[in-house]
């Protein structure tokens, strides 16, 4: 069905189709619309989901953990400080190998108090063991949420998945959305070690160094296997529903001499910048990084790279630029832009490319 | 005691200290609850007592969760069992620190939402498994490793906080009276909605008495009125049998606190204050039982 939807409502629509047994959530701007919509689906009887209106995000994730371990499908959504408040439980969810799906509406972190887009909230959860995907359109928010359930619940993965969408610039804007007839794309949840009173076990007890170490390795092994599961799932999604996704969305990259690497809605803006630069004779391309964990291998050899980071690791550098350098050894021009919703237009992005100084870092509108 | 089932859900060898009354209490809680039960346990002595991976000393599933999260985790679990059409008992078994301090927000939220579960706080009046640091449930004057001169504040009144949430059932219990505890757990689990039981669990190393005195210390707590056993069903308070005598004439507090090393620095003023608070509490409970307040 074709409709017009916000990013938030697209996520809610996908969740409704995935039919989770339990949704536990706490409202926070700009995520609120997602859970309001789910609450109304539940109230109208459109979905048989137990909706738990918890008193905090820490409890939202704890409730999802408690539900998930019994073997049922669970979902929650949050943003910014809500995500940070959950941090401890994010480790717990991944460590307990629970396939919880969460939408995170990317938002800056205070102080000063700011509700606009930034990726610091999600990147602060980098080492929790969650898979993280970043979307660039309303359609992709919907598609990625559907795929997230399937990827998380795959027995080769059994790790939680976070679907990230930019606050307001995607959560609240209206774009066309084509929903799918899901069919059997998301099979019933099957957790191999779900709680069973007939086979009592201790879940998450004290663990000595040797066993703990093995558990950590198992998470990493699943993270590595997740690359295949993601690829297979995205390929099957393309076969069934006609929309193709990959670890990064490449735009005019084949012959590009300079590539803009970015995430979320800035990645879509970068495509317009690339069109502009091509008209000027600059062989530019855009690579919108979709999966942040597991971090993909990007083919950037022999090109100049401009990385736009909507985040910063203080005392160090932009997180995406640093990750790319660590993975590929490639030096880039690192532009820090869009923090706290700072406006970044395609003209600005074209300027970043025109004025690139490989090996340097620039804070857009501040250090120049 | 003949009505108590012979089935055991805790093995004979656990990592509990000698004379541990919280594991004694849990033994009766599980006998009352039966095998269709899941325990949710935050960081506390029980998370140690159950043993180290890959072993477990309990014969029911135990879900270990982070310190602040037990009640919220149980909320999710209870709803998941409901959605799957299962009647499984969800029981939180949490220490006082995880209940009155770090876990109180989740506790309050779960009670406000009417979560169908039983929350049991076993109260050894300190952070026990980390070597007895002060908690909000530590009584005035008690020595802990973080109150080396004796606690200068009074014990947080958890029962009044829980009562303010109007759960359909709440009760106090003590490990020294296992039959009373057993009956209360049975009754609690027969009721739909949030239930709460607060167990006083004397702790030999923490309270500094010999491990063979655990039952005696628990009985002294009840006899002196330091700990009052009662139930509150749908708001109606009934004092339990073992506390009837204390309600009429409690033994002096000295009998209870002099038996424990943790009160050795308690001054006469502190002893008097403890005695006064007992009298005030007994008077309040008496009035509430008579329906005066």
Image (spheres, grey):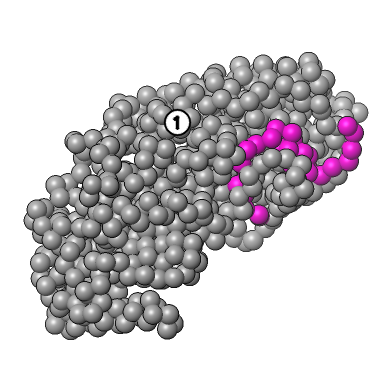
| Point 59% across, 60% down: residue | A111
Q: Is residue B285 left or right of residue B129?
A: right
Instruction: Report the front residue among A66 and A90.
Output: A66
| Point 47% across, 69% down: residue | B235
Q: Is residue A307 left or right of residue B287?
A: right
Q: Residue furthest front?
A: B2
Residue B37 painted magenta:
no
Q: Is residue A282 visible?
A: yes
Q: Is residue B61 left or right of residue B113?
A: left
| Point 72% across, 21% down: residue | A184
Task: Please state the extent of the stretch shown in magenta in the rendering.
Answer: A1-28
Against A244, is A321 above or below?
below
Which residue matches tag 1? A196
Which secondary structure, mark 1?
Answer: loop
Residue B14 image offset from top left, x and y in percent:
21, 38
Tell me the quarter of the picture where residue A120 sits: top right
Residue B41 image offset from top left, x and y in percent:
38, 45
Residue B286 image offset from top left, x and y in percent:
33, 79
Q: Residues within 10 Å of mark 1 (few under 14, many from 20)?
A: some
The C terminus of chain B, quarter of image = bottom left
Instruction: Report the front residue among B192 and B72.
Output: B192
Q: Is residue A330 visible?
A: no
Residue A15 painted magenta:
yes
């Amino acid at each position: 069905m074709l409709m017009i939807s916000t990013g938030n409502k697209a996520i809610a629509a996908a969740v409704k189709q995935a039919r989770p047994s339990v949704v536990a959530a706490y409202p926070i701007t700009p995520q609120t619309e997602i859970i309001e919509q789910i609450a109304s689906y539940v109230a109208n009887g459109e979905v048989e989901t137990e909706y738990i209106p918890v008193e905090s995000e820490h409890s939202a994730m704890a409730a999802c953990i408690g539900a998930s371990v019994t073997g049922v499908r669970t979902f929650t959504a949050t943003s910014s400080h809500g995500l940070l408040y959950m941090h401890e439980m994010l480790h717990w969810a991944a460590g307990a190998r629970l396939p919880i799906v969460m939408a995170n509406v990317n938002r800056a972190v205070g102080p000063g108090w700011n509700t606009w887009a930034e990726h610091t909230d999600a990147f602060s959860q980098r080492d929790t063991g969650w898979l993280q995907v970043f979307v660039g359109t309303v359609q992709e928010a919907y598609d990625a949420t559907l795929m997230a359930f399937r990827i998380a619940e795959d027995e080769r993965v059994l790790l939680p998945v976070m679907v990230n969408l930019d606050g307001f610039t995607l959560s609240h804007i209206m774009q066309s959305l084509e929903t799918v007839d899901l069919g059997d794309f998301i099979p019933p949840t099957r957790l191999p070690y779900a709680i069973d009173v007939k086979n009592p076990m201790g879940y998450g007890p004290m663990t000595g160094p040797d066993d703990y170490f093995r558990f950590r390795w198992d998470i990493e092994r699943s993270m590595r296997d997740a690359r295949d599961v993601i690829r297979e799932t995205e390929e099957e999604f393309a076969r069934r529903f006609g929309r193709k996704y990959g670890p990064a969305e490449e735009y005019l990259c084949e012959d590009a001499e300079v590539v803009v690497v970015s995430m979320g809605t800035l990645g879509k803006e970068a495509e317009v910048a690339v069109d502009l630069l091509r008209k000027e004779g600059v062989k530019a391309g855009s690579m919108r990084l979709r999966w942040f964990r597991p971090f993909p291998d990007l083919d950037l050899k022999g090109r100049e790279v401009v990385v736009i980071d909507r985040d910063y690791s203080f005392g160090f550098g932009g997180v995406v630029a640093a990750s790319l350098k660590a993975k590929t050894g490639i030096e880039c021009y690192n532009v820090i832009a869009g923090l706290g919703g700072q406006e970044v237009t395609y003209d600005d992005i074209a300027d970043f490319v025109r004025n690139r100084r490989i090996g340097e870092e620039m804070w857009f509108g501040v250090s120049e | 005691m003949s009505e108590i089932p012979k089935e055991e859900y805790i093995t004979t060898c656990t990592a509990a200290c000698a004379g541990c009354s919280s594991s004694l209490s849990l033994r009766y809680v599980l006998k009352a609850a039966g095998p269709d039960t899941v325990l949710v346990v935050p960081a506390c002595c029980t998370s140690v007592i159950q043993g180290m991976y890959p072993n477990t000393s309990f014969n029911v599933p135990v879900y270990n969760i982070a310190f602040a999260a037990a009640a919220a985790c149980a909320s999710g679990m209870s709803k998941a069992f409901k959605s799957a059409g299962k009647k499984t008992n969800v029981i939180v078994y949490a220490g006082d620190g995880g209940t009155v301090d770090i876990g109180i927000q989740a506790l309050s939220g779960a009670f406000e939402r009417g979560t169908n579960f039983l929350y049991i706080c076993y109260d050894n009046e300190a952070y026990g498994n980390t070597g007895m640091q002060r908690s909000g449930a530590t009584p005035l004057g008690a020595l802990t490793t973080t109150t080396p001169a004796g606690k200068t504040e009074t014990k947080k009144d958890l029962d009044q906080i829980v009562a303010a949430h109007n759960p359909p059932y709440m009760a106090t219990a003590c490990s020294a009276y296992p039959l009373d505890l057993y009956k209360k757990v049975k009754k609690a689990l027969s009721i739909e909605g949030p239930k709460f039981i607060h167990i006083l669990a004397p702790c030999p190393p923490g309270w500094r008495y010999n491990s063979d005195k655990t039952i005696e210390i628990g009985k002294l707590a009840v006899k002196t009125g330091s700990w009052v056993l009662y139930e509150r069903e749908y708001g109606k308070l009934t004092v339990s049998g073992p506390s009837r005598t204390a309600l009429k004439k409690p033994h002096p507090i000295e009998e209870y606190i002099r038996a424990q090393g943790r009160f050795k620095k308690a001054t006469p003023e502190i002893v008097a204050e403890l005695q006064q608070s007992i009298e005030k509490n007994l008077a309040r409970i008496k009035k509430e039982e008579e329906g005066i307040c």
